[in-house]
Image (cartoon, rainbow, N blue to C red):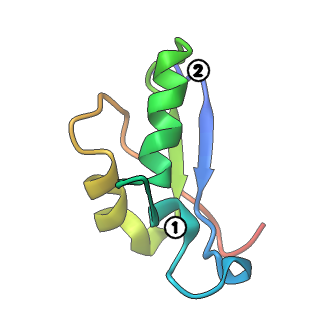
Amino acid sequence: MTVHALVVAAGRGTRAGPGGPKQWRPLAGKPLLRRTLEALAAAGLARPLVVIHPEDRAEHDAATAGLDLPPPALGGPDR
């Protein structure tokens, strides 16, 4: 597998206040992670590897539906 970018989206977002991790929050109708991935694709960085929290697979799958991505990697318990 060739990876051209690594997108770390495993954080819990505790500093961002209520509303859950910011990578899953909508920004102009789309999850922030999807906007990030679309921007990378527009810049020619295809198939980035996304790192997620082990409990966030459903959110990842919803945010990345229809995108050609490798399965996400799972982040560890902390930085």
**Residue at image mark 1:** 53
Residue 34 percent coordinates (x, y): 42, 44
Residue 61 percent coordinates (x, y): 28, 54
Q: Residue 64, which numbered label?
A: none
Quick one: label 2, few (<14), some, or many (20+) residues within 10 Å?
A: few
Rendered-image quadrant of the N terminus? top left
Q: Say which residue appears at 53% left-offset and 40% top-offset.
A: 36
**Residue at image mark 2:** 4
Position of residue 63 in the picture relative to residue 49 (left or right): left
Q: Amino acid at mark 1?
A: His
Callout 1 secondary element: loop
Residue 56 percent coordinates (x, y): 41, 69
Residue 60 vertical placement versus 13 (above, below): above
Q: Amino acid at mark 2?
A: His
Q: Quadrant of residue 38?
A: top left
Residue 56 vertical placement versus 40 (above, below): below
Q: Say which residue appears at 56% left-offset and 15% top-offset.
A: 43
